[in-house]
Image (cartoon, rainbow, N blue to C red):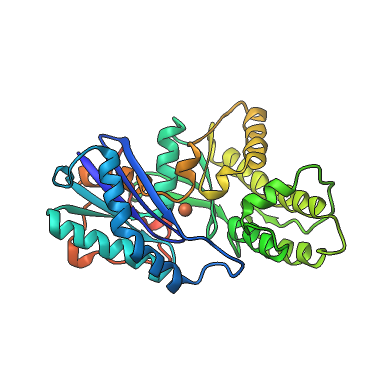
Amino acid sequence: MPVIGLESSAHTFGVGIVDNGKVIANEKAMYKIGTTGMIPAKVAEFHIDNSEEVISRAIAAAGISASEIEGIGYTMGPGLGPCLQVAQLSAKMLAKKLDLKIAAVNHCVAHAEITRHYGKLKDPIMLYVSGGNSQILTIEDKPFRHYSVAGETFDIGIGNMLDSFARNLKLNPAWGSSIEKHSKGGKYLQLPYTVKGMDFSFTGLLTRATELIGKNDIADLCFSLQETAFSALCEATERAMLLKNKREIGICGGVAQNKRLRSMLNQVAIEHKSRFSYAPDEFNADNGAMIAFVAERMLEDGMSTPINKCEIKQRYRADTARLPRD
Ligand code: FE2
């Protein structure tokens, strides 16, 4: 059944349409982050200004008419409150207008599930790395089918850490991808490395690397920041994989677009004769298609939410979200 999905948890207003597990549209409008980072109310205003246009664009790209849509999903959380509200309210309005069942989708689960689909992963250790989150996830069937968190950041998400450092370096754009670009040819500098079991921390690393700005080469700083943070993620993921006895590694979320992190994880997989895989980049960046993808399965599994119960949850954890059957 054609299902539309709306995503607005952070800087992207994304709209995707899925039909029988196949993505038939994935459109977006992205708020441009300047030197200040994201001011939630401003980003929400951007989403309000763009929601109608992106929804129309997605329906046109799918080659269907609005009346053919049979269900709707929206990101319930986690994310920035004012931003989440835009997809929530747009979903409610569309649901009323088109008489649709609604699925309230967990953003982290959506990243992991679209990656399991495109990466052809059955039961992986999933490293979820984005701006606000960094977690190692595995699927558990008890007491209900869900992603459990094997390890996670003690403080900030890896993406947030990389973006903050890009801003501190005054790189343009101030994104983690600029750190990757500037890391080429860098030499390693010793930086704080924190892994405790399967959990990790990035704030000490960010503070120390920021103190070294102006005293060291930018390439050396970017290279060392990435190597240190990514090694911590790989160590924790490897430990989780061995303890949970898994044979597949997946990576999802915005930072899954980083080629260096992917090649390091691939190395971990090779050493343990395991398979490493990920989704195309358009699904690692925030997008509406992943929300539609999970929403379709939720609706097929009877997991709809009455319109008056469609809330947002800024701190909606993956391990509290019920996962639909495959
Ligand atoms: Fe995301």
**Residue drawn at point x = 67 percent, y = 45 percent:** 235
Residue 188 appears in the figure: yes
The percent coordinates of residue 272 (x first, y second) are 63, 30
The percent coordinates of residue 282 (x first, y second) are 46, 42
Q: Quadrant of the N terminus?
A: top left
Residue 98 drawn above or below residue 25: below
**Residue drawn at point x = 30 percent, y = 40 percent:** 61
**Residue drawn at point x = 62 percent, y = 32 percent:** 269
Where on the picture, by quarter, is residue 6? Answer: bottom left
Residue 62 drawn above or below residue 160: above
Residue 146 appears in the figure: no
**Residue drawn at point x = 56 percent, y = 53 percent:** 151
Residue toward you, 305 or 15: 15
Count the labels in the image: 0
Where on the picture, by quarter, is residue 170? Answer: bottom right
Left or right, 275 with respect to 208, comes to left
The percent coordinates of residue 79 (x first, y second) are 43, 63
The percent coordinates of residue 229 (x first, y second) are 69, 52
Residue toward you, 35 or 16: 35
Residue toward you, 218 or 107: 218
Residue 123 drawn above or below residue 128: above
Q: Quadrant of the C terminus?
A: top left
Residue situated furthest right in the rendering: 215
Left or right, 260 with respect to 37, comes to right
